[in-house]
Image (spheres, grey):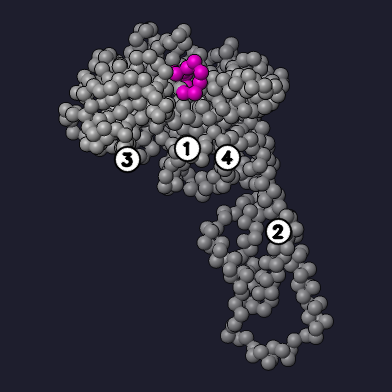
Amino acid sequence: MVSHRLVRSVERVETKVEAATNDPATKAAAMMDDDTVPGAEVDGRWPQRPPRSRQAAHRRAAQSPRRRHAAEPAPRARRATEPPRRGRRAAQLATRAVACAAALAVLSGTGFAWSAKTDFEHGFTRTEAIPDDAPHSLGGDMNILLIGLDTRKDLNGNDLPKAILDQLHAGDGDNGGYNANSLILLHIPADMKKIVAFSIPRDDYVAVSGIPGYDHAKIKEAYGLKKAAAQAKLINNGEKDQVTLERQGREAGRASIVQTVRNLVGVPIDRFAEISLAGFYDLATALGGVDVCLNHAVDDSYYSGASFPAGPQHLNGSDALAFVRQRHGLENGDLDRTHRQQAFLTSVAKSIRDTGTLTNLGKLSELMNVAHRDVVLSGGWDLLDFARDLGSAGSMSVEFRTLPVLRYDNVDGQDVNVVDPVAIKKEVRAAFGFEAAQPTPARVPTSTVDVHNASGRTGQAAKLSAALATRGYRPGAVGNGTYADGSASTVSYGPGAEAEATQLAETLGLTATASPTTATGHITVVIGSDFSMPTELTPASATASAAPTTAPDLPVPDSGRPVATQIGSTVPCVN
């Protein structure tokens, strides 16, 4: 393959040498138009790749030099002055030798860049957690789910070396499980004007599906619970290889966390990235540490190892991990932890920009090693091209948000965040710039609503039907779902019921679709395992407040206001 590239480079350089020799007026242009080396490093800097249209024009110009010039001699005169065949052959060999030397010089400068890009892309563990038939964003927008996995094992299920575990302040390989303790959903619009990043609190109590024995769980557990279920099924089928069990189990966990987040926020997820607990440490270490700023001094030596003074400070890799992991002793508990993760990302971006990591081969190589060891990417995602596109967009603005929490509660002995999925969907769609649904004028519904329970939870259909009756909807058939209903929550309607079905779907956080099997004037609601009763339909909604219901002494959740910044700008101070 290298030889083919060399031949192509030789041919192109020959063309340019001949063009420059025969036409002095085009010599400078030919020398500047070497798009065979788009990634060549010059004085330690990587030139920006010209737009594809310019590249194509340059390439055509180089391959088809002008053949007629005003001062071009007549054919007869040109033949009269041609050198003998042997001399002409010597001139051609000399030209080829010069071209070879130039091409070798070109390849020696760009060979690393080409090879590094190939090695970089091929070095990642890839996941198919986002299948081809999954919902995808339109118009060039991109939604990316980033998760930080709280595991003390490598990708093959082996315990991390003790030296690393000691740096992590995180116990041994038996601690932590496979919780997705960091969850951030990024929205990058096609116009690259503003990135919106939503942190998802890890203890949000949400609907889950496909996990035996669970219909709700903390969102962080969707990965580990599904991984355990998938491994148990493999073992029952006779699988004994630990690497196979680990890798296939994790793949099932990734698909589960993607589906769970997508169901919660109601928008497509186009790309996925997973970084391990050790990855946070390795990333910060490869960058030479990160800068952070604290509003108050903290001492969480016993749990996370975080013990820092107030104010701006520089943390090494071990302390940076403690910084993003601490949740004990914080004013707002886990929600403050999400703000720290946002500050960490801001600091990493600033460090990469300020230190010129992407233009320093040594630092870039070290960063590549970290990424290959600790990061898993969705299939088909070209990370270097993605980074180049972001870089070409300049200093983009970034808005950090945290999904809202209604209140804290305790379920089956676990502290959880009670959330309103419908309100979350509305907030995420509005922040991502999706067109809001036009408000429907208040009217007394005339449609009949049939409710099918496919969630596996007893009594859900009757509960929803009764709640809708208080809103004026006519109660219809109530019963268990059938195989044709599927397992996901849906709203469908027959002739004459579109407007009211759309209004009802908006209330439920779903999308209404026409159905040829639904009777005229009827709406069918299927309650799937992903369904959560909207707060406004619960009996307590009229008097509900943000205060906790089971533990009045708990603080009121505070997700904080959106934090606006820019890529590479000053790191914000956090609790």
Name the amino acid, label 1.
Ala
> Callout 3: helix, strand or loop?
loop
Q: Which residue is mark 1?
A: 134
Q: CA distance from mark 3 to mark 2?
A: 48 Å
Please identify the quarter of the rendering in which residue 425 is found. top left
Q: Is residue 553 magenta?
A: no
Q: Is residue 213 magenta?
A: yes
Residue 133 on image: x %, y %: 48, 39
Name the amino acid, label 3.
Glu
Give the residue at x 51% y 21%.
Answer: 211
Relative to 360, 543 lies left or right = left
Q: Nearer the viewer, mark 4 or mark 1?
A: 1
Count residues near mark 4 (Cα–Cα under 10 Å), then give few for <14, some for 14-19, many for 20+.
some
- Numbered label attached to residue 5: 2
- Numbered label attached to residue 435: 3
> Callout 2: helix, strand or loop?
helix
Q: How many marks?
A: 4
Q: CA distance from mark 4 to mark 2?
A: 27 Å
Residue 460 on image: x %, y %: 34, 17
**Farthest residue in the right direction?**
86
Q: Nearer the viewer, mark 4 or mark 2?
A: 4
Name the amino acid, label 2.
Arg
Give the residue at x 56% y 36%.
Answer: 128
Give the residue at x 33% y 19%.
Answer: 479
Q: Nearer the viewer, mark 3 or mark 4?
A: 4
Between residues 295 and 138, which one lies in front from this camera angle? 138
**Magenta-drawn stretch, dominant element (helix, strand or loop):** loop
